């Protein structure tokens, strides 16, 4: 416990330092005592972007942690159940028809993406219930099936779209925080608050799920209800992030696994550690993309591309080092 608390304290200090220092870096360094236009850039553009990155990273990491506990597999990601594909399909349809509007600071693309994410959640839930009960393998296979189906529809929409619309769809699917602002931050926070608190209250149940569903049942856990709550909380957080930032991969797979090495597998400590580490990781990645764009003098690299470049080798390393087989 002492080691876990020390690690948590270190992550908290690192998180505060990241939130304080990251806005200073970008195409050009801007000090905290900046004035005039630099002050406007620092507090009006970079600051909300940093907080959006931290919130999105924390939500993806928490979702990945909960799915890894639910499926008892460290290779599970927030996008395992097809929420990302549903959101991408909604955004692709919206872009294809050339629509443009916003409500309460949320763009039409984001709203269409969130509707797509909700559709994916409902379909996965419905297919799982249709088979009877709410078994983990059925939930997983339903999510994979929906993910593949929606991905094929996205390819079809890209095929029938013009060059401009097709480019916009591809760019959105790379995942970026370049348009983040305070209204988008306010849109993210309710998902983080509800989903994060729900998962925090389910730490004991997730510990038991990691041991085995039979053990959880023997300890009096209503496994059907808990699985539904985990599925709902994680999926809504993923849907909120993807709707606003686009699909940003591998954050939700890497962060919980690294935190288990630092903290251990007890979700009492793993949950806040994953929250902090996920936020730190995505914020630093987004800061790096801003700095690299300043050095190269070209277009900014979407943060989803950078996380994929880091996550791909990590995934292979994790797969090769994992003992035993891959269980559904």
Image (spheres, rainbow, N blue to C red):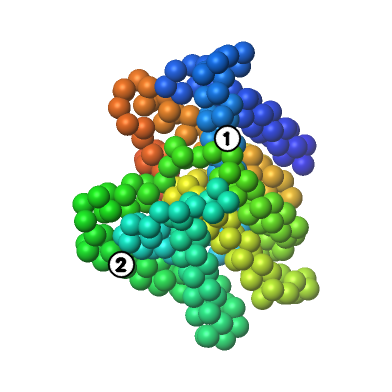
x and y, in percent, of residue 67 in the image = 57, 60
- Horizontally, residue 101 falls left or right of residue 42, namely left
Q: CA distance from mark 2 to mark 1?
A: 35 Å
| Mark closer to the observer (2, 1) | 1
Determine which quarter of the picture holds residue 13.
Answer: top right
Residue that numbered label 1 is attached to:
48
Viewer-side residue, 214 vs 135: 135
Instruction: Check disc 2: other Cα within 10 Å, few if <14, some if 14-19, many if 20+.
Output: some
x and y, in percent, of residue 307 in the image = 42, 41
Q: Secondary structure at mark 1?
A: helix
Write the residue at 22% across / 64% down: 160
Write the residue at 56% across / 62% down: 235
Q: Secondary structure at mark 2?
A: helix
Residue that numbered label 2 is attached to:
152
In the displayed structure, would residue 77 be above or below residue 11?
A: below
**Residue 286 visible to an observer of this rendering:** yes
Viewer-side residue, 275 vs 210: 275
Instruction: Check disc 1: other Cα within 10 Å, few if <14, some if 14-19, many if 20+.
Output: many
**Which numbered disc flags the more N-terminal residue, 2 or 1?**
1
């Amino acid at each position: 416990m002492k080691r876990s608390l020390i690690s948590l304290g270190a992550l908290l200090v690192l998180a505060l330092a990241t939130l304080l220092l990251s806005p200073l870096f970008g195409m050009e360094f801007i000090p905290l005592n900046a004035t005039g236009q630099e002050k406007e850039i620092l507090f009006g553009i970079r600051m909300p972007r940093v907080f959006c990155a931290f919130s999105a990273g924390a939500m993806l990491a928490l979702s990945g942690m909960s799915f890894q506990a639910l499926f008892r597999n460290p290779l599970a990601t927030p996008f395992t159940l097809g929420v990302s594909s549903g959101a991408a399909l909604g955004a692709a349809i919206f872009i294809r028809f050339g629509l443009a509007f916003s409500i309460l600071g949320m763009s039409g693309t984001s709203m269409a993406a969130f509707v797509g994410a909700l559709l994916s959640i409902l379909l996965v839930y419905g297919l799982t219930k249709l088979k009877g009960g709410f078994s983990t393998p059925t939930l997983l296979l339903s999510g994979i099936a929906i993910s593949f189906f929606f991905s094929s529809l996205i390819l079809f929409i890209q095929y029938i779209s013009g060059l401009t619309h097709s480019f916009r769809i591809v760019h959105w699917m790379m995942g970026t925080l370049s348009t983040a602002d305070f209204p988008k931050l306010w849109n993210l926070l309710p998902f983080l608050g509800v989903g994060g608190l729900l998962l925090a209250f389910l730490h004991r149940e997730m510990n038991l799920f990691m041991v085995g569903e039979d053990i959880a049942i023997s300890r009096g856990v209503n496994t059907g209800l808990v699985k539904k709550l985990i599925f709902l909380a994680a999926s809504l957080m993923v849907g909120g992030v993807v709707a606003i930032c686009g699909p940003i991969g591998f954050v939700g797979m890497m962060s919980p696994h690294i935190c288990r090495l630092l903290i251990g597998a007890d979700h009492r400590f793993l949950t806040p550690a994953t929250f902090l580490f996920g936020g730190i990781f995505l914020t630093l990645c987004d800061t790096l993309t801003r700095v690299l764009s300043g050095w190269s003098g070209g277009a900014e690299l979407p943060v989803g591309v950078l996380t994929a470049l880091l996550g791909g080798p990590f995934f292979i390393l994790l797969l090769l080092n994992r003992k035993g087989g891959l269980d559904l």
